[in-house]
Amino acid sequence: MTRTALVTGGTRGIGAAISIALKDAGYKVAANYAGNEEAAARFRGETGIAVYKWSVADYEACTEGIRQVEAALGPVDILVNNAGITRDAMFHKMTPQQWREVIDTNLTGLFNMTHPLWPGMRERKFGRIINISSINGQKGQAGQANYSAAKAGDIGFTKALAQEGARAGITVNVVCPGYVATDMVMAVPEPVREKIIAQIPVGRLGEASEIARCVLFLASDEAGFITGSTLTANGGQYLT
Ligand SMILES: NC(=O)c1ccc[n+]([C@@H]2O[C@H](COP(=O)([O-])OP(=O)(O)OC[C@H]3O[C@@H](n4cnc5c(N)ncnc54)[C@H](OP(=O)(O)O)[C@@H]3O)[C@@H](O)[C@H]2O)c1
């Protein structure tokens, strides 16, 4: 049976690498994105993977987007909650809007995407939910109170839902990447990036494909005994 995977934020960076790895492994794949049409069109052209535009921060849009994906590809068996944004600022300068945007996308987005898919996974007695959190959800990061709170929330969400899904054959796991060479990290000024790299024991940024391999492992039928776990991939930067 060919399983269907849906990857949020699946057209760029880590999400794109995840979409491609899943496709190469034989899954049917749908990649969601928020608004960067150029990147989505390029990704679709290069990979042949179907792309779907909606915001994970909008519950109704998620429900409708999932309906379209399932009409085209069949029931979603594997959900990768990867979409994420940063709106960094020291807390005394952080605006309510910066707080809300990050919480709405990086935390509530997981509810918005998982909730509509959950009943079908329960009925079919199979599901793989893989959430992409962050090293900064594990250790906290100055300038990212919003991001760290959301990403720590992703870990709690994973652990709670894993307990609910276990009897229904649904596993829920979370991957915590360290710093990975994507647009998100390349947007950080170079001197700051150099300082970050100096703190990574393996001496380099991660590759998006290295995070994709973690997801591929957790998505497989054979990973059914692994649920509620936090898989850390950060080059040794933070050991939990
Ligand atoms: N890069 C790192 O070092 C790092 C480290 C730890 C964790 N992470 C996490 O890994 C995930 C991917 O990061 P990345 O570096 O690959 O990011 P990225 O290169 O900035 O790509 C982000 C992707 O998410 C999509 N997206 C953003 N907001 C969305 C929304 N509201 N609805 C739907 N899609 C949305 C974007 O769509 P558009 O293309 O349309 O904008 C894009 O496809 C994020 O959750 C991030 O927090 C990244």
Image (cartoon, grey):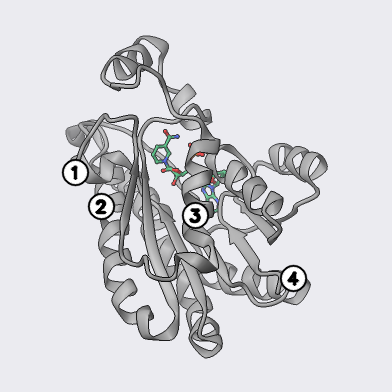
Q: Are marks 1 and 4 in contact (CB under 8 Å)?
A: no
Tell me how far mark 3 sits from mark 4, CA to CA.
22 Å
Q: Indicate which disc, 1 or 4, sits on the residue closer to the N terminus.
A: 4
Looking at the picture, how far across and down is residue 98, in whole percent? Answer: 34, 43
Which amino acid type is marked by label 4? Leu
Can the viewer see residue 15 in this picture? yes
Q: Residue furthest front?
A: 222
Which one is closest to the eye, mark 3 or mark 4?
3
Identify the disc placed on residue 240. Answer: 1
Can the viewer see residue 82 in this picture? no
Name which quarter of the figure residue 146 lies in: top left
Q: Indicate which disc, 2 or 4, sits on the residue closer to the N terminus.
A: 4
Whether ligand 1 has any atom under 8 Å from the Cβ at mark 1 is answered as: no
Which amino acid type is marked by label 2? Ala
Residue neighbourhood size for the residue with mark 1, other residues' Cα within 10 Å, grouped as few (<14), some (14–19), many (≥20): few
Circle 2 SS class: helix
Q: Which residue is mark 4?
A: 73
Q: Indicate which disc, 3 or 4, sits on the residue closer to the N terminus.
A: 4
Tell me how far mark 2 sits from mark 3, CA to CA.
22 Å
Give the vertical position of 86 relative to 61 (above or below): above
Q: Indicate which disc, 2 or 3, sits on the residue closer to the N terminus.
A: 2
Tell me how far mark 1 sits from mark 2, CA to CA.
13 Å
Which amino acid type is marked by label 3? Phe
Q: Which residue is mark 2?
A: 152
Tell me how far mark 2 sits from mark 4, CA to CA.
32 Å
